[in-house]
Image (cartoon, rainbow, N blue to C red):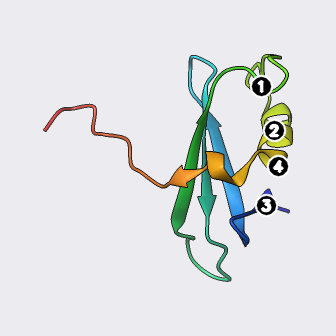
Amino acid sequence: MPNQRAIKDTVYEIVSEFYDNGESSSLAKTIVDEGDGVNTYRIIVASHNPLTREPFNKDADKLWAYLRGNESDLWRTYWDDPDEGGE
């Protein structure tokens, strides 16, 4: 079962990845029966839990425990990262 949670009264699938520095990026995608969901919200989380100050150590279960209950207002409208190649 995919990780799902409600954000602003709508249920989304949450997809996360860790960066080399231990920070993570999580996307809230619309849930669709077939095909890809639409990226709707995004949050960048430091390498440690903001509430407990405990490091995530790139542990997806620890990150998900935080994401499952954090405030919906922390999620921002989805944005793409800028291209690293410049223009």
Q: For the residue marked with disc 1, what is the amino acid?
A: Asn
Within 10 Å of the Cα at label 3, are there few (<14), some (14-19), or many (20+) other Cα atoms? some
Given residues 73 and 21, the one toward you in this image is 73
Within 10 Å of the Cα at label 2, are there few (<14), some (14-19), or many (20+) other Cα atoms? some
- Find out whether the residues at labels 1 and 4 contact each other: C-beta distance under 8 Å: no
Marked residue nearer the N-terminal end (1 or 3): 3
Please name the residue shown 79% across and 60% down the image.
Answer: 5
Q: Going by the image, does 79 lie left or right of 52?
A: left
Q: For the residue marked with disc 4, what is the amino acid?
A: Arg
Within 10 Å of the Cα at label 1, are there few (<14), some (14-19), or many (20+) other Cα atoms? some
Label number found at residue 5: 3
* Measured Cα–Cα span from mark 2 to mark 4: 6 Å
The residue wearing badge 2 is 66
- Find out whether the residues at labels 2 and 4 contact each other: C-beta distance under 8 Å: yes
* Measured Cα–Cα span from mark 1 to mark 3: 18 Å
* Measured Cα–Cα span from mark 3 to mark 2: 12 Å
Q: For the residue marked with disc 3, what is the amino acid?
A: Arg
- Find out whether the residues at labels 2 and 1 contact each other: C-beta distance under 8 Å: yes
Q: Secondary structure at mark 3?
A: strand
- Find out whether the residues at labels 3 and 4 contact each other: C-beta distance under 8 Å: yes
Percent across and percent down for residue 10 are 71, 72
The residue wearing badge 4 is 68
The residue wearing badge 1 is 49
Marked residue nearer the N-terminal end (3 or 2): 3
